[in-house]
Structures are given as C-alpha cells and as structure tokens.
Image (spheres, helix red, strand yellow):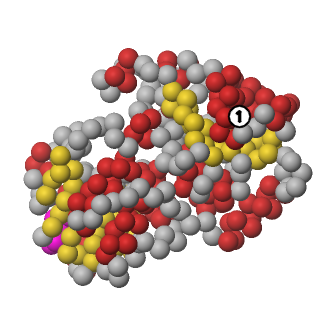
Amino acid sequence: MAILVIKLKHIGDVLLATPALRHLKAQLGTEPISMLVRGGTEVALAGNPDVHDVFSVGSLPQGRRGTRASWAENWRLFRWLRRGNFRAVIDFSASDRGAICGLLTGARQRITYDNPETGSSFCRRLYSTRLPYGDYAEHQVVKDLKLAGFFTGATAKSPRLRYEVTPAATAWAEKFWSRHAPPGTGIRRVVCHPTSRWMFKCWERHKMARVVCELVSCHRAHVVITHGAHESETSMAREIAASAAPARPELADGLSFDQLAALLKTADVFLGIDTAPMHLAAAVGTKVVALFGPSPPERWRPWCDAYRVLHQPCACQTNRNLTCPKSAVMQCLQAVSEAQVLAAVREVSGWQ
C-alpha cells in the first residue's frame, strides 16, 4: 500500500509542501509516498528522498490534436492512479481535478481542506474528510503540515523547505562564481531575481537597477540577474541589466532549476520578488530579501530564519480583492523605496 499526495499548484507551492512530505515520511517509515503535481513543477522534487514516485499532469492542449493528446494523458493518469494501490489520498490543493483523481484511486480515505475559494461544491463532496480551512493568513507551510499531522495523528513540526542540489550543479555554480567572485577575495555574491510572469508582483525596473548599482559600488558585490523563461521576463531582466550597466551585473540566461538552486546555495544573499526562486533560496539556506505586492507575506513569506520582507499595506489586500490593475506596478510596491531595500540587504547580511 502507498500514500498519494496531491499538489496541483505552482512550483513554489510544491516547494512549500516539502516540510509536510518530510513529516509524512518520518511517521510512515517505509510506506511509499507518491505525489501528483502539475507539469513542470516536478523539478522541485528531484532527488527528494521523502518521495518515492512523482507523476506530473500538464495543461490540456486545444483543438483536435489537443483532444487526442488529452485523452492519451488522462488514460495514462488513470492507469497510474489505479496501479498505485493507494490506501489514502492527501490533497493539499483542494482542486476539482485533485478531487476526481483522488476518487479514481479507489482509496477510502481522501482528505483535504474545505476551502470554498477553490473547487466546486460538488467536487468537495468527493473527499471522505474535509478539515476547516481556518485562517487564510496562516502560512501555507503550516497549513500543509496541519493536514499531514491530521493524517498521521502526530504533531507536525516545522522543518525548513527541502531541495537537494546535485554535486554536479554545485560544482558548476562554484565555477560560475569563480570568474568574478572567487572565494577569498571578499567579493560578495548576490543573486537578483526581479521578474515574474505576473506584472503585479514586480517592482519598478529603474529602482531595481539603482539598487544593483548601489550593491556593487558600496558593498563590493557581484550581482547575477536571473529570470524565468517567459519572453516578458527575459525582456525585463535585460532592461534592468542594461540600466545597471555601470555596475556590470551578470545576466544568467537558460539556467536549469538545479543550476539556479546551486547558484542560490553558493550566494550570500538573494534579492527578489515573491516568486518560486524566493522559496528555492529559502530551501537551500540562503539569506533572503523579498519584495511583496498584493500577496499576503504572512502566508507566502520565505520559510527560513534569515529573511526580510518589504511590504506596504494596500486597500485591495484588506479584502483580498485586487482592485489595482494587474498589468502595472501596484501601489503597494511603488511605495517601497530603494533605501528600504538596501537597508534590508544590510540588515539580513550584516554588511556595513
């Protein structure tokens, strides 16, 4: 018999589930834990010793070819669910798709949160147990741990996030840094990730460029700018790098997830916005400075000890109704100054 954990969310959400996976593994011993995730997010579980098997499902294509592809993928998923011999399902995402997948396993115990904001009322009835969702502002790591603790009947502690960087990626990262910030030279290593597909999470580009220049000129840092694969993110990162040209930041294109993790692990500080790389930096033990827009930091903050969050309250955050235009920098981010960001970097790093 085995346990199925479902997390059909984004890559950062999968990382935030790793403390709960660690708790389940510690309590269940040799019983295998399988995980069902959204396509592309399985990289966050690469090498994770707490997970026996990972199955990823992608977004379904459109059109006739898409119909054939979707039937093929659904059949493959159905066979995997039925062959898994699962005795229980724990769904951290509480989605309609997760509810149906849980039902298809044939497991009698299927638990999730009763969250009226996700999924339909019909699909929520497909679970055998639904826990009260509780406080929306509670950190997602804590919520996942509570669900795992309910299943095991043991108090779930709050370990840090888990990502296993491969030795090959670590060696690559050290070689990468050695060109401009070799060990023993006193040059500080900063990874800056200023981009997101969602513009409402991004800080003003000219401000980030000036902060990069200040870190180089006043703190003897070598700054590496990373970004996602989306064209808009690439364009934004290049614009920031060009604006900060006097500081000669390095633009890191085409990194694999493992290379990004290794780069973060061997850096002194991560500076960025509320994205998956922020959670990855926390997972590998790097100090984090994060700028938050409309997302509540009490729920999504970096899950680590050494971090600083820069956040200005906004009216739309009070009722969780984003009234600001999502295509532009939001007011809560515009209110964050360059001086505040630099002060946060100095505070978390101990730099003078």
- Image x and y of residue 39, in percent: 42, 59
Residue at left offset 53%, top offset 62%: 163
Q: Is residue 70 left or right of residue 217?
A: left
- Image x and y of residue 92, in percent: 30, 55
Q: Is residue 104 rendered magenta in the image?
A: yes
Q: Is residue 274 rendered magenta in the image?
A: no
- Image x and y of residue 298, in percent: 41, 36
Which residues make up the magenta segment?
100-107
- Image x and y of residue 142, in percent: 35, 50
Residue at left offset 80%, top offset 62%: 175
**Quadrant location of residue 67?**
bottom left
Query: Can I make out residue 1 in this image?
Result: yes
- Residue 156 or 120: which is nearer the viewer? 156
Query: Can I make out residue 277 in this image?
Result: no
Residue at the spot of label 1: 346
Residue at left offset 27%, top offset 77%: 2
Q: Residue furthest right?
A: 185
- Residue 307 or 259: which is nearer the viewer? 307
Is the magenta region chiefly helix, strand or loop?
A: helix
